[in-house]
């Protein structure tokens, strides 16, 4: 069963994209006072890219905190990232950084809310990927 863990800011762009995929999912808390998310099964991480095109700050602090937990980090099997093409070379940089650090595939990049084509490609790709792991 495909399982997604995602972070979404208050704008909810990433949340809306994940909901369109229709898979079981859990959200990394937005606020530090919210209960910490612990994951004990394989998952694909979906994250936006922050920083407005700067390398520093590309990975949201909430995602860093989540991945600093060894168990959470160890169950990540892939990453999908959102970004803004206006960021230039930093487009979807959070996914590149996480992929390199965790040595998991950066499976897909989408802009802002994603298109219906993005949703279809990611949905089908995740189903296929999950059958292989």
Image: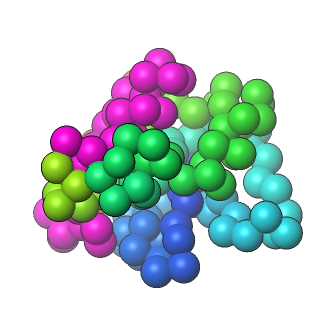
Q: Is residue 95 above or below residue 115?
A: above
Residue pictured at 65% horizontal, 54% vertical? 62
Indicate the position of residue 12 as horizontal and vertical percent values: 47, 77
Quarter of the figure with residue 97 = top left
Identify the residue at horizontal 18%, vertical 70% (top origin): 116
Q: Is residue 78 left or right of residue 88?
A: right
Q: Determine whether 11 is above or below 18 in the image.
A: below
Q: Which residues are magenta?
A: 89-117
Q: Say whether residue 127 is left or right of residue 7.
A: left
Q: Residue furthest bottom?
A: 11
Q: Quadrant of residue 132?
A: top left
Asked where in the image residue 22 lies, by quadrant, the reply is bottom left
- On whether residue 112 falls in the magenta region, the answer is yes
Residue 46: tell me if it is visible. Answer: no
Residue 125 appears at what percent x and percent y? 28, 43
Is 59 in front, or is 23?
59
Q: Is residue 100 magenta?
A: yes
> Which residue is located at x 79 percent, y 47 percent?
38
Number of labels in the image equals 0
């Amino acid at each position: 069963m495909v399982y997604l863990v995602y972070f979404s800011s208050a704008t909810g762009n990433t949340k809306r994209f994940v909901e369109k995929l229709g898979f079981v999912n859990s959200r990394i808390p937005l606020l530090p006072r919210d209960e910490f998310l612990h994951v004990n099964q394989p998952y694909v991480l979906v994250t936006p890219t922050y920083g407005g095109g700067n390398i520093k700050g590309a990975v949201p602090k909430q995602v860093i905190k989540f991945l600093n937990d060894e168990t959470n980090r160890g169950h990540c099997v892939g990453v999908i990232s959102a970004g803004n093409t206006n960021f230039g070379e930093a487009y979807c940089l959070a996914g590149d950084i996480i992929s390199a650090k965790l040595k998991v595939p950066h499976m897909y990049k989408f802009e802002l809310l994603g298109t219906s084509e993005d949703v279809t490609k990611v949905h089908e790709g995740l189903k296929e990927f999950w059958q292989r792991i």
